[in-house]
Image (spheres, rainbow, N blue to C red):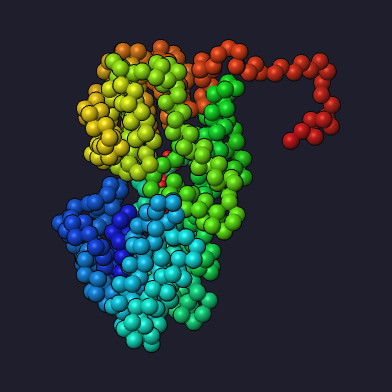
């Protein structure tokens, strides 16, 4: 099939490349000349494992084209995916200006039936707005005779695993209109996604609004799990429990499951913070604030401070003369994305307190330098106190503490003896719970994770003593059965 993708950001590029890999002819359109120039020269605007190879192969084999020519992109295909950005506007709602501009362009150039598919994450009701602007353009051209249908096909790609997520989807959500045009749209989309449904039907067909809502609901549910685990982790620190053991204990219940239960420094990235915020706004606009999700956001903001609180506890709030090693800058492994990365606020706070920071990340250093320059626009002199180093161990030499912020594989098994000997004071603040507290203690390293029973942080009076229940007689069998 011929397919046009509008927008060569993360979602557009992965979708375009993977659809070409499946044998379709794909035209990728973007207004950014520099980006299209880079892609045509074999360069990559983002870091995503495996993507460059797929793009290269499909460009060479003539199935994938990058261009800024809007008219040509509309003539190329009957199926158009809109995959442009939906940044938050001032009040946190999703800003639809790029989505609607893309729709307008299609309306301006189309000469026959088109299916316009919203792939970007857009609030419920956006498909109707897209249809309205296309109708407006057609009316202006006096071409109301041309039919079209707007569908919703949200993406569920994870950065760093996007190719695999696209090629082996858990589900393909298709929202289509309940009319003859919607039927035509559905037939085309089913044909496009046929390769994924050979052994097992993965398509979920629904109305457009439910499809739009599904994307937000999925991200909100996942973000809720994370904030809930983070809150439990903070309590685990107080009561002297280890959240990692608790995670394993609850994850074995299939109703809970193991995924997305890792406590850490708070969720980041381009999706969760933005989508959770946008859903909260939508709920407020409809007079039904989502109380749980509002709390999820508050907990996440606070979680970005938890490691810092451990730093203040250990060193006080003045860090002049101290050096902090940081391992990991990207918001998660497998990407160089620094959007909403916890490392940004943590490094900024350390610098503002007078510390020096020596940071390592296998791929995100360049992006991190840019992000920090932006975050410290008002205090650019502090940037002189951050250096980026080539190897993780280069960061720890003479450091007062090592702060681990991204769970890259190469940080998982450091030589603990070398670590202890390299540091001025052997202290590891582990924002990703990569290490075993016992192994750290055995190596002579002071260890603080997230929810790993940091009793040392508490004044003795605050420590909760475990309640010991002395059972002198065996508990009757019916009482045991009654406990659940
Ligand atoms: C997410 C969704 O997973 C994906 O389906 C959607 O299409 C886009 O948003 P992504 O932002 O790439 O994908 O990252 P993800 O792997 O989901 O992680 C999001 C954030 O949650 C990261 O900051 C990560 O560190 C954090 N996280 C994840 C945790 O803190 N604990 C966990 O257990 C899992």
Q: Position of residue 327 (x, y in %)?
A: 33, 29
Q: Report whether 1 appears left or right of 200.
A: left
Quadrant of the rendering where the C terminus is positioned: top right
Q: Residue at x 37, y 75 (%)?
A: 134
Q: Is residue 415 visible in this depiction of the protein?
A: no
- Mark yes or no: residue 111 visible: yes
Is 89 drawn above or below residue 150 in the view shown? Answer: above
Residue 265 pos. (x, y %): 44, 33
- Give percent across and percent down for residue 326: 32, 27
Tell me if residue 193 comes above or below residue 481 in the rendering: below
The answer to whether 187 is drawn above or below residue 268 in the figure is: below
Q: Nearer the viewer, residue 297 or 431?
A: 297
Image position of 41 (left or right of 89) = left
Q: Quarter-wise, where is residue 390 in the image? A: top left
Name of the residue lying farthest toward the left: 41
Tell me the residue at 34%/35% (across/down).
344
Point out the residue furthest to the front here.
Answer: 378
Tell me the quadrant of ligand 1.
top left
Residue in view at x 66 percent, y 18 percent: 466
Q: Nearer the viewer, residue 143 or 477?
A: 143
What's the residue at 42%, 74% (across, down)?
A: 132
Depth check: give the residue in front, 216 or 383.
383
């Amino acid at each position: 099939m011929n397919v046009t993708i509008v927008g060569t950001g993360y979602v557009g590029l992965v979708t375009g490349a993977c659809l070409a890999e499946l044998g379709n002819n794909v035209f990728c359109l973007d207004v950014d000349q520099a980006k299209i120039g880079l892609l045509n020269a074999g360069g990559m605007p983002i870091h995503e494992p495996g993507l460059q190879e797929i793009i290269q192969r499909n460009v060479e084999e003539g199935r994938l084209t990058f261009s800024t020519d809007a008219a040509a992109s509309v003539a190329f295909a009957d199926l158009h995916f809109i995959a442009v950005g939906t940044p938050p506007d001032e009040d946190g709602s999703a800003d639809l200006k790029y989505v609607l501009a893309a729709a307008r362009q299609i309306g301006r150039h189309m000469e026959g039936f088109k299916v316009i598919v919203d792939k970007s994450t857009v609030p419920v009701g956006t498909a109707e707005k897209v249809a309205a602007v296309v109708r407006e353009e057609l009316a202006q051209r006096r071409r109301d005779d041309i039919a079209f249908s707007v569908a919703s096909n949200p993406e569920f790609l994870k950065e760093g695993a996007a190719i695999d997520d696209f090629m082996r989807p858990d589900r393909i959500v298709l929202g289509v209109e309940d009319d003859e045009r919607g039927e035509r749209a559905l037939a085309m989309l089913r044909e496009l996604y046929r390769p994924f449904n050979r052994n097992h039907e993965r398509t979920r067909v629904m109305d457009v609004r439910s499809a739009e809502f599904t994307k937000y609901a999925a991200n909100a549910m996942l973000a809720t799990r994370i904030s809930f685990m983070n809150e439990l982790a903070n309590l685990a620190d107080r009561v002297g429990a280890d959240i990692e053991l608790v995670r394993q204990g609850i994850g074995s219940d299939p109703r809970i499951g193991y995924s997305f239960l890792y406590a850490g420094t708070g969720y980041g990235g381009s999706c969760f913070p933005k989508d959770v915020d946008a859903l909260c706004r939508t709920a407020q606009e409809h007079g039904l604030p989502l109380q749980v999700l509002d709390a999820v956001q508050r907990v996440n903001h606070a979680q970005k401070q938890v490691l810092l609180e451990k730093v203040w506890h250990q060193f006080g709030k003045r860090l002049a003369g101290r050096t902090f090693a940081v391992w990991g800058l990207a918001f998660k492994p497998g990407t160089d994305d620094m959007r909403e990365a916890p490392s940004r606020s943590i490094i900024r706070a350390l610098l503002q307190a007078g510390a020096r920071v020596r940071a390592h990340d296998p791929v995100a250093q360049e992006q991190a330098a840019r992000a920090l320059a932006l975050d410290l626009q008002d205090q650019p002199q502090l940037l002189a106190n951050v250096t980026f180093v080539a190897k993780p161990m280069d960061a720890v030499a003479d450091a007062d503490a090592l702060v681990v912020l991204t769970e890259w594989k190469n940080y998982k098994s450091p030589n603990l003896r070398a670590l202890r000997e390299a540091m001025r004071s052997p202290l590891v603040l582990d924002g990703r719970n990569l290490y075993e507290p016992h192994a750290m203690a055995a190596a002579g390293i002071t260890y603080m994770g997230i929810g790993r029973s940091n009793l040392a942080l508490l004044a003795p009076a605050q420590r909760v003593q475990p309640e010991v229940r002395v059972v002198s007689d065996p508990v009757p069998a019916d009482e045991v059965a009654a406990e659940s």
